[in-house]
Image: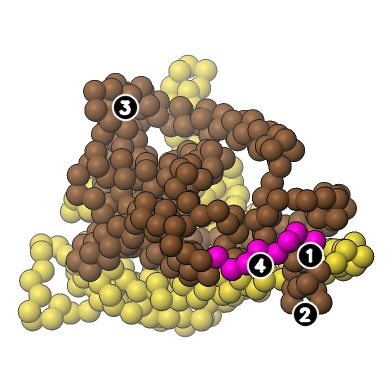
């Protein structure tokens, strides 16, 4: 979660240091979010900008931050590994490990499996790198930053679009920023919001459906984020934003109370072996 | 394998996305040309790039700069590939200000291959003053700075027309079907037979628009051919490597379950 947040920050700083039109105006939009904070907002803003608007000092700062944040990510990754080794990890069945027959060694089993997955991803990634490097970018970023010309539509890169849509669908600056912040930080609260005793969606038929609805909702938000905030797009964006929060604050707690989960298998190894026997993939 | 399937579907979806995006701001469908550099094996046509450079130099360069391109780039592999001697001759036709010399004076000298392509105007204000207040944009990255750039550029260059009776034109503006707002400050830049190609290709407006678009696509993507070539090797390597890893994964996990 913290890794995700830092990753978003690093990606944003990296996008700004290209210093094209979209970088400059994206930086203007995002840094201005801090201006919405009551009392300290303005001071925070001039600290971030190194002046009174986005300018060369801002660029310098973002260069250093872009270099610094990966080290922070590295630190958090270390914590992540600690968490993996000390409290242990969950698994697709969501039940406690009951003995050595339930586990396998990380190496060679997971190194072999994950390396394969990584290379499959690289294959997918390489298509973009070599054959369509501009497919996901905005043409406007090939125009040099110009403070006197605002692009007709300011849009962030695709991976930030859902949050951008949430920000825009609320007509008040402070509330909009707060909503966007909550949209990210709510993920921290999920362990307390989720009232279900069952730790895996595999045995929760209702939750499974809501999960897919939520995914579709996030994709809709992403699409809306790329479109101008007007007419139908605005309405759909607001509904999708509302649903985003309903999912976390209403559906997640209520579902845990009303849903009847499917029976849990006795242990991990048993569930896996049963599946293999009936020919299903584990 | 489920994850692989999903990512393949996702990739397919993303690949299909830009297809719908090739419209100008007004929702006018752009003209579509089959460019030699399209597709995963696309390459530039050297003769076309040379012709395109000639069009740039004799027509566009009157107002538009290509400030990110140096003369020496014209002889780079994957570009128009002029000979180095030809590049020297081309460069020497313009003057650049250099200095200060030992006396502290700036002086003029003929441009050399190391210099950036000389701009038509000393600064933006001079450019505006000479062009009715409109700033002729730099063209180095133009095909990347517009949606579906090459087709857009070709469409604009060939999209001039008489203004329809119901459109009121501002002073000094020209009507263009593909330019956002349909009023463009640049008068029709090219007409048939405006340049004489050395290789004898008939210099129709359509041909010149194609050639200069190809040239400007090269200035925006000078490493396009390298990228495509390397990409092909990488894809083959990764595919084989993924196959081997899948076999390894299956073998390692064989005794579990």
Asked whether A192 or A2 is in front, the reply is A192
Q: Which residue is drawn at 52% across and 73% down?
A: B13
**Residue A41 sits above or below residue B188 on the image:** above
Q: Residue B246: percent from the left, percent from the top?
A: 82, 67
Q: Distance between the residues labelled 4 and 3?
A: 42 Å
Chain holding disc 4:
B
Q: Which residue is drawn at 68% across and 54% down?
A: A95
Q: Which colour scheme is used?
A: by chain
Q: What residue sits right under mark 3 in the picture? A: A45
Give the number of the mark in front: 2 or 1.
1
Q: Distance between the residues labelled 2 and 1?
A: 13 Å
Q: Which mark is residue A278?
A: 2
Chain holding disc 1:
A
Q: What residue sits right under mark 4 in the picture? A: B3
Give the number of the mark in front: 1 or 4.
1
Chain B appears what colour? yellow
Chain A appears what colour? brown
Residues rendered magenta in the picture: A261-270
Q: How many marks?
A: 4
Q: In which quarter of the image is residue A46?
A: top left
The 10 Å Cα crowd at callout 1, few under 14, some 14 to 19, many 20 or more, is some
Asked whether B242 or B53 is in front, the reply is B242
Mark 3 and mark 1 lie on one chain; the one further toward the N terminus is 3
**Left or right: A91 with respect to A3?**
right
- Check residue A122 for magenta coloring: no
Give the number of the mark in front: 3 or 1.
1
The 10 Å Cα crowd at callout 2, few under 14, some 14 to 19, many 20 or more, is few
């Amino acid at each position: 979660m913290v890794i995700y947040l830092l990753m978003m920050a690093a990606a944003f700083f990296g996008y700004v240091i290209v210093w094209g039109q979209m970088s400059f105006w994206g930086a203007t939009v995002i840094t201005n979010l801090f201006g919405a904070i009551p009392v300290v907002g303005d001071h925070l803003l001039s600290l971030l900008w190194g002046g009174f608007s986005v300018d060369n000092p801002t660029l310098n700062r973002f260069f250093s931050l872009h270099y610094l944040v990966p080290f922070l990510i590295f630190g958090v990754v270390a914590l992540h590994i600690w968490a993996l080794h000390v409290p242990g990890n969950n698994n697709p069945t969501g039940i406690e490990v009951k003995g050595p027959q339930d586990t396998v060694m990380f190496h060679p089993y997971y190194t072999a499996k994950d390396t394969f997955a990584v290379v499959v991803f690289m294959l997918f990634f390489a298509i973009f790198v070599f054959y369509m490097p501009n497919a996901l970018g905005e043409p406007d970023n090939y125009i040099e930053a110009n403070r006197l010309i605002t692009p007709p539509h300011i849009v962030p890169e695709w991976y930030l679009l859902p949050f951008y849509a949430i920000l825009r669908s609320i007509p008040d600056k402070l509330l909009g920023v707060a909503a966007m912040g909550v949209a990210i930080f709510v993920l921290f609260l999920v362990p307390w919001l989720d009232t279900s005793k069952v730790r895996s969606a595999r045995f929760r038929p209702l939750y499974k459906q809501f999960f897919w609805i939520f995914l579709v909702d996030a994709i809709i938000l992403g699409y809306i984020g790329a479109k101008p905030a007007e007419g139908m797009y605005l309405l759909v964006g607001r509904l999708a934003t509302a649903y985003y929060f309903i999912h976390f604050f209403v559906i997640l707690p209520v579902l845990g109370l009303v849903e009847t989960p499917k029976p849990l298998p006795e242990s991990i190894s048993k569930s896996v072996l049963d599946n293999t026997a009936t020919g299903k993939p584990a | 394998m489920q994850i692989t399937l999903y990512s393949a579907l996702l990739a397919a979806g993303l690949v299909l996305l830009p297809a719908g995006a090739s419209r100008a701001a007004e929702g006018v469908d752009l003209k579509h040309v089959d460019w030699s550099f399209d597709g995963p094996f696309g390459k530039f046509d050297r003769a076309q790039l040379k012709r395109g450079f000639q069009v740039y130099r004799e027509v566009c360069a009157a107002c538009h700069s290509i400030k990110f391109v140096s003369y020496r780039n014209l002889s780079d592999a994957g570009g128009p590939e002029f000979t180095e001697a030809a590049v020297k001759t081309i460069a020497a036709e313009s003057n650049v200000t250099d200095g200060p010399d030992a006396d502290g004076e700036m002086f003029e000298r003929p441009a050399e291959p190391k210099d950036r392509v000389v701009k038509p105007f000393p600064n933006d204000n001079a450019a505006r003053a000479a062009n009715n207040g409109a700033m002729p944009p730099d063209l180095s990255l133009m095909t990347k700075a517009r949606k579906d750039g090459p087709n857009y550029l070709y469409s604009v260059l060939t999209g001039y027309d008489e203004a329809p009776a119901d459109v009121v034109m501002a002073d000094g503006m020209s009507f263009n079907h593909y330019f956002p707002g349909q009023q463009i400050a640049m008068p029709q830049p090219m007409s048939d037979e405006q340049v004489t190609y050395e290789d004898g290709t008939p210099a129709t407006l359509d041909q010149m628009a194609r050639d200069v678009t190809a040239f400007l696509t090269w200035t925006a993507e000078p490493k396009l051919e390298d990228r495509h070539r390397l990409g092909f090797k990488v894809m083959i390597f990764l595919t084989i490597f993924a196959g081997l890893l899948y076999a390894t994964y299956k073998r390692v996990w064989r005794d579990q379950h």
